[in-house]
Image (spheres, rainbow, N blue to C red):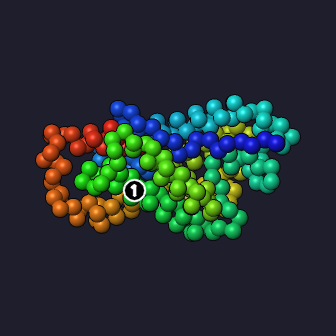
């Protein structure tokens, strides 16, 4: 039996340009001053391109298996469907409003905790262990909130592979499936990321005993660099 793995997932990366590979995270970082806005289109362009290339790579590696699995048919729905390997699709019982709320809440929790992890005035995480902790966070969110929609939490990892499957043989049914569900994992995470960052600032960050301690302790301009060097997802 063919057991494909979902591609273009919620992977982690940390590098000297900033490791977040999620447009929703990049958006929240810009909105709340963690990253400069002029970098946003470059990050998002690279994120979508990377997810598209990742989907193409998985398709190439598993091409023969995909062809053999359903007698050469690339199906979006049914027991032999394989489109779900690349992008998320809603459960049959879920409504679009419920699916949207699902994506907003899951991404809100993601950003809320990511902001906490990288807040030096919070308890924080030992330096160098941030990717591991965020990986565990994503596993926890995916295991607990994936029943309804697959828990994308990342517009790039969903839309780019979906576009690839439309071009690779599954057809544009990938955009109409689930009552035109495709926009939910694109818009929902962006909204959820905003609220996650906002709630962290309003409920936690503004209540630190000395809001200026971090700025005073670091050389000028290093606060922004800290976020860009450390943030994952």
The residue identified by callout 1 is 113
Residue at screen point 39% across, 44% down: 130
> In the structure shown, which secondary structural element does the residue marked by tag 1 occupy?
helix
Residue 170 found in image quarter? top right
Q: Nearer the viewer, residue 103 or 40?
A: 103
Residue 119 rendering spot, x and y as whole percentages: 29, 52
Drawn side of residue 77 relative to residue 182, left or right? right
Task: Rate crowding at label 1 as few (under 14), some (14 to 19) or many (20 or more) other CA atoms within 10 Å.
Answer: some
- The image shows residue 171 at horizontal and vertical percentages of 72, 45
x 19%, y 49%: residue: 214
| Quadrant of the rendered image containing residue 89 | bottom right
Q: 70 or 168, which is in the foreground?
A: 70
Judge whether 39 appears above or below 193 on screen. Answer: above
The quadrant in which the C terminus is found is: top left
Residue 26 or residue 108, whichever sits in front: 108
User: Is residue 172 in view?
Assistant: no
**Residue at 50% of width from left, 60% of height from top?**
106
Picture quarter containing residue 209? bottom left
Residue 18 % position (x, y): 37, 38
The residue located at (57%, 48%) in the rendering is 158
Image-based side of 202 in relation to 79, left or right: left
Asked whether residue 2 is in view, the answer is yes
Disc tally is: 1
- Give the image location of residue 93, x and y in percent: 69, 68
Image quarter hosting the N terminus: top right
């Amino acid at each position: 039996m063919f057991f494909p793995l979902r591609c273009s997932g919620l992977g982690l990366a940390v590098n000297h340009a900033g490791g977040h590979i999620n447009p929703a995270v990049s958006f929240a970082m810009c909105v709340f001053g963690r990253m400069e806005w002029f970098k946003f289109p470059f990050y998002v362009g690279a994120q979508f391109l990377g997810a598209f290339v990742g989907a193409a790579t998985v398709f190439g590696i598993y091409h023969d298996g995909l062809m053999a699995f359903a007698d050469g048919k690339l199906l979006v729905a049914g027991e032999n469907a394989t489109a779900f390997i690349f992008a998320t699709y809603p459960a049959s019982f879920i409504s679009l409003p419920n699916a949207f709320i699902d994506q907003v809440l899951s991404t809100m929790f993601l950003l809320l905790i990511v902001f906490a992890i990288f807040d030096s005035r919070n308890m924080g995480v030992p330096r160098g262990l941030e990717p591991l902790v965020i990986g565990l966070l994503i596993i926890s969110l995916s295991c607990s909130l994936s029943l309804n929609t697959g828990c994308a939490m990342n517009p790039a990892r969903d839309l780019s592979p979906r576009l690839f499957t439309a071009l690779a043989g599954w057809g544009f049914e990938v955009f109409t499936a689930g009552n035109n569900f495709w926009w939910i994992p694109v818009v929902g995470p962006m909204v959820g990321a905003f609220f996650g960052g906002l709630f962290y600032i309003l409920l936690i960050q503004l209540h630190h005993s000395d809001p200026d301690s971090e700025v005073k302790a670091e050389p000028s301009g290093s606060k922004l660099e800290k976020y860009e060097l450390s943030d994952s997802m």
